[in-house]
Image: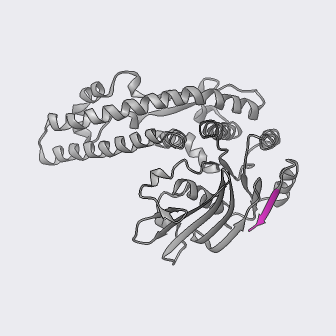
Amino acid sequence: MHLEKLSLINFKNFESKSFDFQDKINCFVGNNGIGKTNVLDAIYYLSFGKSYFNPIASQNIKHNQDFFMVEGEFLLNDRNEKIICSLKRGQKKIIKRNDKVYERFSDHVGFLPVVIISPADRDLIIEGSDRRRKFIDSVISQSDKLYLKALINYNKILTQRNTLLKYFAANRTFDALNLKVYDEQLEEYATEIYNKRKIFLNDFTPIFEARYQFISGGNENVNLKYKTQLDKDNLITLLEQSVEKDRVLQYTSVGIHKDDLLFEIEGYPMKKFGSQGQQKSYLIALKLAEFDFIKQQSNVKPILLLDDIFDKLDETRVSQIINLVNEDDFGQIFISDTHPERTEEVVKNTNQSYKIFKL
């Protein structure tokens, strides 16, 4: 799979811009703030129907404009595929595949797999558990539609249960049987999600650890652990035990929406004990493992977006990553960097076809 052409209208800082791409390596170079990352985000948008950096869709419209449109022409399994994502202020977002509008955005997820590595990934380490759960969900959902459906249903029922708890508090009433209806539905979807997350991490962790060993030169031991309340008991029991607490808090305090990933180096939290270089290597290994896993599941090489990849990495680790790019395991790659000379030097050494766009 590769992206042949990208067209942007009123997307972020671009009024109107088109690009024709090489099927291997494409680089965007220029000063900070000129839009390099925005091009990568547009490619991400075509895959996921949303921005990697800004979840508020209307904020991706160029200032003083009424709409944006991102259009991509792909070659996938010898077929031409045209994807259009557009949004007009005050209206619903539209995603089209070959001029046919998707009724549900979830039907598009996983069709064009994309993996992005960005400085923004540091949020995976420094932010709360919600960011890490989204990472797990994003990886699994690209190859498992049933998982995505279960996740959507779980979150819908969770919202309804929380609304009911707020209603109880506001009206000084309580109906245990009404609450139990939601509990039983939550338990059904939670069990499916929990089991699939466990299986995923069992398969994913060795891939991740091997990637980290390669990038770091085998000098450090890292780990990835799944933290979940469902290891203690089934969700129905947990919900029954926490019902009084939930009534006070007015939201559901237990469930798979509280799951987390623990990032460790030498048995200690990466957040506290990892250097900047180690943290970045950890995140890159995580994302390369995501690439490997999705390729394994879908038999399609995802498009790889490398945003400011060389920042904060020493020369040894950079060279290790470039060696990875030389492997046949990878397909089309997009790179953004502030140093044109450095970028060209790096991509020349890959002996792959490349194209450099100076923005």
Answer left or right for 146 relative to 46: left
Question: What is the x, y in percent for residue 80?
Answer: 64, 59
Task: Please say if 337 is above or below 137.
Answer: below
Where is residue 259 drawn, in percent x and y?
44, 33
Which x, y percent locates residue 351? 87, 49
Front-lying residue, 84 or 276: 84
Q: Which residues are magenta?
A: 354-359
Q: Residue furthest top?
A: 232
Magenta stretch contains residue 102: no
Q: Is residue 118 left or right of residue 317?
A: left
* Residue 269 position within the rendered picture, expressed as x and y whole percent measured from the top left: 58, 30
Magenta region, main secondary structure: strand
340 to 330, vertically: above or below? below
Left or right position of 329 against 188:
right
Quarter of the image for the C terminus: give it. bottom right
Q: Is residue 7 or residue 299 the one in the foreground?
A: 299
Picture residue at 53% right of the left edge, 74% below the top: 63
Using residue 42 as the reference point, say whether residue 233 is left or right of it: left
Q: Does residue 208 appear in the picture of this structure?
A: yes
Residue occupying image coordinates x 12% and y 44%: 172
Residue at 56 percent across and 45 percent down: it is 123
